[in-house]
Amino acid sequence: MNDRTHMQQAKRMPAPPEGLAGRLKETAKGLWSLVVGLGVTGRVFTQKQDTVHYPRVTVPETALEGYRGHIELVAKDEDPHTARCIMCMRCVKVCPSGCITIKSKKIEHVEHKEQDPDPNTHHNGGLQPLPKQSVPRPGKGKRELTKFQLDYSLCSLCGLCVQTCPASSLRHSKHVYWAGFERKDFTLDLLDRMHRQAEAKEES
Ligand code: SF4
Ligand code: SF4
């Protein structure tokens, strides 16, 4: 700080009070400001706290209404171990950060179809109509989800994947407490998470 700035600042400062009365007035003013400050501190100290002493205390899920954590898979209502996902890949395509990886495999599936019986086959001497027959046929396009991975270190929580999913198979989690030291700590296996959630529900 140069001399000129120093002098300009000194000019702006109020002059010290003159005489005993002036000094007493200034001291009383200072003490009153201290009392007001302590009053504010005391009031806040006795109020209900909005913060918690993590990790000794954690926030209950009911207090996390509207919180947008990382995405997670939503399971079918009738089968909590199977995701609603229909493997359309829309979430992968819409994600601006490329943080979703999905893998699936074709599964052996046999469908049974009802069909009219062979007209050359006689039933009860041809007096009664022949019943329909159940014929096994290989199922078409049945796939199973084998991997649903999220790289949270890239995710911007934009929510586009959740909005785009036609099967309502994605939602934002309420997973607040997540810390790590390396980037790979933020890679999440969402299928595994969904299975663990289902098991926890079954045990409770
Ligand atoms: S919230 Fe956005 S950035 Fe994160 S996975 Fe979904 S689309 Fe990608
Ligand atoms: S958009 Fe939905 S249904 Fe399609 S792959 Fe993603 S999670 Fe599955």
Image (cartoon, grey):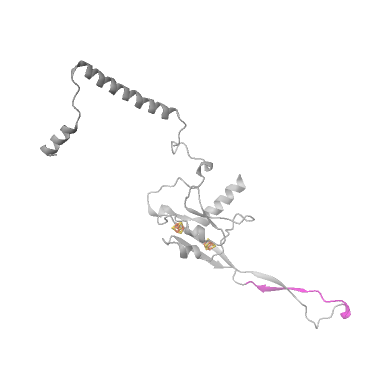
Residue shown at 18%/33% (left/top)? 12
User: Measured from the top left, where is residue 83 in percent x and y?
Assistant: 57, 58
Q: Is residue 130 magenta?
A: yes
Q: How many marks?
A: 0
- Where's ligand 1: which quadrant? bottom left
Residue shown at 52%/43% (left/top)? 61
- Tell whether 35 sits left or right of 46: left
Q: Is residue 31 magenta?
A: no
- Tell whether 102 sits left or right of 82: left
User: Measured from the top left, where is residue 19 in percent x and y?
Assistant: 18, 17
Q: Locate the C terminus and report the quarter of the image it occupies.
A: top right
- Tell whether 204 sits left or right of 21: right
Nearer the observer, 93 or 46: 46
User: Measured from the top left, where is residue 48 in percent x and y?
Assistant: 47, 32
Residue shown at 87%/80% (left/top)? 126
User: Measured from the top left, where is residue 37 in percent x and y?
Assistant: 35, 27
What segment is highlighted magenta in the picture? Answer: 124-139
Q: Is residue 14 above or below residue 65?
A: above
Nearer the observer, 195 or 65: 65
Residue shown at 38%/28% (left/top)? 40
Nearer the observer, 183 or 27: 27
Farthest residue, direction left: 3
